Image (spheres, rainbow, N blue to C red):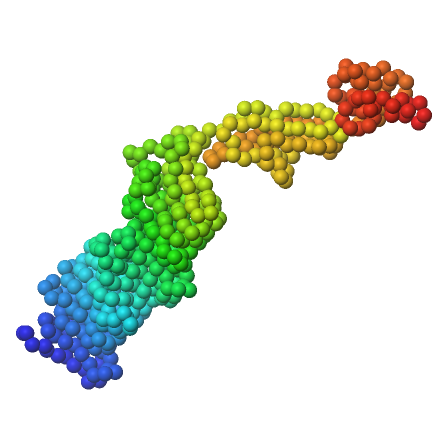
Amino acid sequence: GLSPTHLHLKAHTLFDGTGEIIMDRYAQLSADPGVVLTQGPDHTIRGTGNLKASLINDGTVRADDPVNWLTLDTNPKTNNGTIVADADCRLDIIGTYEILQGEDGLILADGGIVLLKSLSTITPMSITGGTLGTLSDGVIRTGSNDTVLTDVNIAGLLEVDFGTSILVAGDGVTNNGTIHVNPSATPSFAHFVFIEDSELSGLGELILGRSWYARLLTNAGVVATNGVGHTIRGNGVMSGDFINNGTIAPGESIGLIETFSPMTLTQGPTGVIDVEVGGTGQSEYDRMTGAAAYNLDGTLRVSVVAPYVPLVGHSYTIISGSSVSGSFAAIEGDLPGPGLDWDVTYTATSVVLSVVHCDLSVDMQPLNQTVCRGKQVTLSVSAFNADSYQWQFGGEDIAGANASTYFIPFALPADTGLYTVVITNHCNEVTAGASLFVHPGGSGDVNGDGAFDGRDIQAFAEALVGNMSVNAGYCAADITADGDVDQDDVHPFLYTLLFE
């Protein structure tokens, strides 16, 4: 009929058993103030009409009429069972009350539509705990104003439609499905807002659906975390304080996330910024722009979009903000091409990705050397396309030895050994090496017979005029132990020979 028909409860009531209450159009299930309807685990309320009573549901509430919809209205609901919209059916949850769900509580769109329709932005409707799920192309969608989600699991598709907001409180939302903010790309704002320090966790994704009109925000003083394994992607706006331990992928496919002040984005070690490049023009690669302060760590992941072919010298300003600190610990994804690699340049306000040569080769090896104590030793290497050098002695890094040349100003016998240099660039590493032997000097036993006497004079003269290679005898003639046999050694040689 066209007139409302009421099942009205005057006292707390339990519907137990395996039966059902079938509601048709204009049917209303209501109760006196303070009166609670409890539905047992095997009982069902289904159909259309309006379920206004305060409810504890341990069973099933089902919208199964494809022509008219079932409305949950007016009073708080506790759901430990299932509230479901069947295929091609609609369930409206409307009002300013709270739905409190137990661990097994499930609001499900099984091929149908569940609409969350708050009547107020001052006292919005709230859902705490349990799961919002969809099956068989069903959808849960905001229908008006604000809905607060506290410690809720998302297992399916949640659409934040234009002109509405989802507010996140408590520990946050565990999303193993898809949250789509402004999915219809309507030129009217849709918001996903953190009103308390919370995390967007799980293995799902949040999609910003239309640039200026799809917004991911935090209230003042609130920090939101994108959890490990979770993805934020699309074209839209971010503003507030965010920690990224998951993935942020601007663009859908190529596009941008714009940031508004005040905005900070701190990327943790597990965080990923995922960009696609399809050309060098700003409209041809993913980027983040605006007034954000970035503190970077973690990974930059790059994908090349065919048919674009990156070339040496191509560059892409993937981040521009108010400030940039830190750096990516790793770059992964597609390489730009054979013999090429990515290079990242950081300025005070931007991050620029560029294509560079990847080849690395040693043009000149350091030379093996034998010297006397006190000699200045220079070890040099020349390499093509090198970015950094690290000299090592005995396999251990030498502090501060980070140039292509390494100097030992005063060689000692203890410096004898193998010197290697590890040469790196953006994608390769090579090693070169040389040995150094340092003879002790100054003994005067130039001929090596074990005594310093007149028989050493001829050998000393040979060393002085350069007719002797650098060996133990030559270094014995270096009485001054300055690394060379020269005129400075003549007087101390003769004096020591004659008077000591």
Give the side of residue 448 with respect to residue 433, left or right: right
Q: Is residue 190 visible?
A: yes
Q: Quadrant of the C terminus?
A: top right
Q: Nearer the viewer, residue 134 or 199?
A: 199
Where residue 243 sits, quadrant-wise, is bottom left
Q: Is residue 123 above or below residue 465?
A: below
The residue depicted at 44 percent of the width and 31 percent of the height is 357
> Is the residue 333 above or below the residue 139 in the image?
above
Q: In this rendered view, identify the residue nearer to me: 179 or 408.
A: 408
Counting labels gives 0
Q: Residue at x 41, y 34 (%)?
A: 355
Residue furthest right as drawn: 499
User: Dividing the picture into quarters, in which one does residue 79 lie?
Assistant: bottom left
Quadrant of the frame with the N terminus: bottom left
Horizontal arrangement in the rendering, residue 191 relative to residue 482 (left or right): left
Residue 265 visible to an observer of this rendering: no
- Residue in view at x 76 percent, y 26 percent: 483
Query: Residue 173 at x, y = what percent?
Result: 34, 61
Q: Position of residue 316 (x, y in %)?
A: 38, 40
Left or right, 324 with reference to 131: right
Residue 441 in the figure: left or right of residue 284: right
Q: Residue furthest bottom?
A: 10
Give residue 36's position: percent from left, percent from top.
Answer: 24, 80
| Residue shown at 29% from the left, 34% from the top | 307
Instruction: Write down the quadrant of residue 111 in the picture.
Output: bottom left
